[in-house]
Amino acid sequence: MISAEMVRIHRESYGSGAKAVKTYVHDDLVLSVLDVELLPAEAVVIASGRRDLVLDMRSSFQLELETSFTAAVERATGRKVTAFLSDTHLDPPFVTELFRLGPPHDVELAEPETPLVITRRLESTLDAASAARHLVESVAERLPDKLYDVVRLLVTELVSNAVRHSDAEPDATIELVLSISDAKVRLEVTDAGAGFEPVARSDEPRAGAGWGLFLVEQLASRWGVAADPTTRVWLEVDRPPA
């Protein structure tokens, strides 16, 4: 769990994760070692002979992430983090995150919210998007106002795209899965279409593609497409900090 959280935080903060990670837990110490890839700009600075600038920048940035790192370790261990150290090595590139833990049971952690998972099968008709919105409306109390608006919009776009572009038979159905946890909301829409390749994010809608995927690219924390053999489009929206 700690290794996965370290990779997630690095990926979301730097724009890239880690090629490998190992976490060691011994008594009151937790050490995570992540093999990372330097950013292109960092490689340019290093090539110019200013390794010190990269080290200083990474050191400062790692300390800014202390709150996120500490919270992840406390959730995983059930113990309070009393000290944090971070260091970066450039050749080969890897970072170390070291945590000193307090005594067991020294911190009370809130119990995680039980994830809510709802699955619905919708007829592939023009009414499917409306039915999907009603599903989100039925669990509105589980979502903050802004997140509720985003999820309601995105489920409309995913289901509408599945109806319009799947080339499925007239009696086909669409499967919608809505999952709500204390960390994120996940939507999955599965249809009988042939699938498509997701493309990189852009700042404006692509010609002929409409606004659907553009909105997904702008509002979702992450998204993707799987074909096995049906087409499943999924997205996740992270909850805002409390």
Image: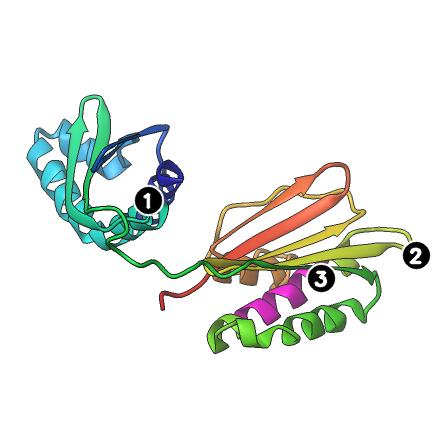
Q: Label 3: few (<14), some or many (≥20) within 10 Å?
A: many
Q: Which residue is mark 2?
A: 171
Instruction: Please tell me whether mark 1 or mark 3 is closer to you in this view.
Output: 1
Tell me how far mark 1 sits from mark 3, CA to CA: 40 Å
Which residue occupies 57% across, 54% down?
A: 235
Tell me how far mark 2 sits from mark 3, CA to CA: 16 Å
Residue in front for this viewpoint, 196 or 146 = 146
Q: Position of residue 205 (x, y in %)?
A: 55, 60
Give the mark nearest the N terminus, 1 or 2: 1
Q: Position of residue 197 (x, y in %)?
A: 63, 41
Q: Quadrant of residue 109?
A: bottom left
Residue 157 falls inside the magenta stretch? yes
Which residue occupies 71% across, 39% down?
A: 227
Report the colour scheme: rainbow
Say if mark 2 contacts mark 3, CB within 8 Å.
no
Q: Quadrant of residue 25?
A: top left
Which residue occupies 90% across, 52% down?
A: 169
Q: Which residue is mark 1?
A: 77
Q: Which residues are magenta?
A: 150-161
